[in-house]
Image (tube, rainbow, N blue to C red):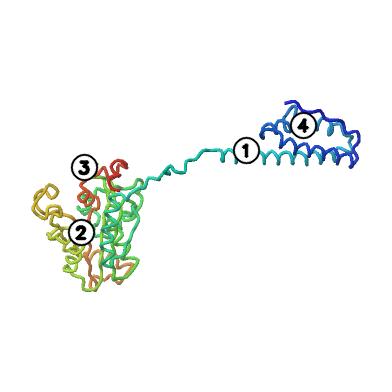
Amino acid sequence: MDADPLPPLGAYDPETLDQAFSALREEVETSARALAGPELFRLRWLGRKQGRLKLLSDAWLKEAPPEARRTVGQRFNELKAAIEQTLHALEQQGDASALLGESIDISLPGTAPRLGAEHPLMRTMQDMVQVFERMGYSVASGPEVETDFYNFEALNFPPGHPARDTQDTLVLANQERKPARERLLMRTHTSTVQIRTMESQPPPVRVVIPGKVHRNDESDATHSPVFHQIEGLCVGTDITFADLKGTLDHAMRAFFGPAVRTRFFPSFFPFTEPSADVQISCPFCGGRGCRKCKHSGWIELLGCGMVHPEVFRAVAGKQPAYDPARVSGFAFGMGVDRIAMMKYGITDIGLLYSGDARFLEQFR
């Protein structure tokens, strides 16, 4: 846009400069009110070729005698700052006017955020943990990357024990130079936390341990290399197998319903003696026989037993109170994934780890 020419100053005394720059400030205020929008104001005053400041610099600043250039330059900078401040105010007014001019229908419903739901695995695990919490058990956790000592040796799996083969262990690479008991692996059961708990506190101990475990299993409808367990440990004086049976019978009734019955069969686990497998009467058919219990009326659910004296001896090096001659205890463990599949009618364990929102939405 064309700019009005600037008359020459003629003199550079303070009075003349005051009058000239005061007139320019009034012109800035007038044009801010008169021009339609901040862009026209910017072009008039800050345009690179014909802006008023460019003309002012050419006509007054460059033509000033050397002794007056500093004074004129200061006045020039003050005027430029005032122009930029006015431009900023005009831009803010324009933004506010644009917002006020938007049409908003306040009667329309807002955009509701999609609420998630607890994963069926986590829900099942938490429900089971709460059963034991009401019985006075604390909750413990531990690392998923463990040493051979905590995963095997302390649990009465000495090197070369055939029961190690059934664990399908995933061993970390480059461990060959370490002593065997210090080699790192992905824990195959949460029993490792039982050892860590006993090392960190003397008896009595009542603790339940939920967590993720890893085994070198092929993925199919009922197996996954990653799955979840809940294990429990109770240690004190005069703890008997009757206490174990009473604890698990009460826990199964609390979780599956008061009509559920339990029965125990002899079994073998290196870290318990005697050991047992526990079955519950099918909570879906009441023991009459259905597809979920394979028409037997019973479902095998967990393993348990009295803590083996060798496990206490492995701990006694750090915590002498676990003398097998003075204390006794029991332990139990169950797979959360299998219970969740049974409870919610899930036929493929892979669905629990797929992250498919279509599958998970049904558990809202």
Q: Nearer the viewer, mark 3 or mark 2?
A: 3
| Amino acid type indicated by mark 2 | Pro
Task: Decide which of 301, 47 is in the foreground and name it.
Answer: 47
> Measured along the vertical axis of the image, is residue 256 above or below residue 328?
above
Question: Which element is circle 2 on?
Answer: loop
Q: CA distance from mark 2 to mark 1?
A: 79 Å
Q: Is residue 1 left or right of residue 17?
A: left
Whole-percent x and y of residue 209?
Answer: 29, 59
| Amino acid type indicated by mark 4 | Arg
- Dot 3 or dot 2: first in sequence order is 3
- Dot 1 or dot 4: first in sequence order is 4
Label 2 packing within 10 angstroms: few (<14), some (14-19), many (20+): some
Q: CA distance from mark 3 to mark 4?
A: 79 Å
Q: CA distance from mark 3 to mark 2?
A: 28 Å
| Amino acid type indicated by mark 1 | Gly
Q: Nearer the viewer, mark 2 or mark 1?
A: 1
Question: Which element is circle 3 on?
Answer: loop
Task: Decide which of 134, 235 is in the foreground and name it.
Answer: 134
Q: Nearer the viewer, mark 3 or mark 1?
A: 1
Whole-percent x and y of residue 73?
Answer: 82, 38
Label 3 packing within 10 angstroms: few (<14), some (14-19), many (20+): few
Determine contact: label 2, label 1, CB under 8 Å: no
Per the image, the residue denoted by label 1 is 94
| Amino acid type indicated by mark 3 | Ala
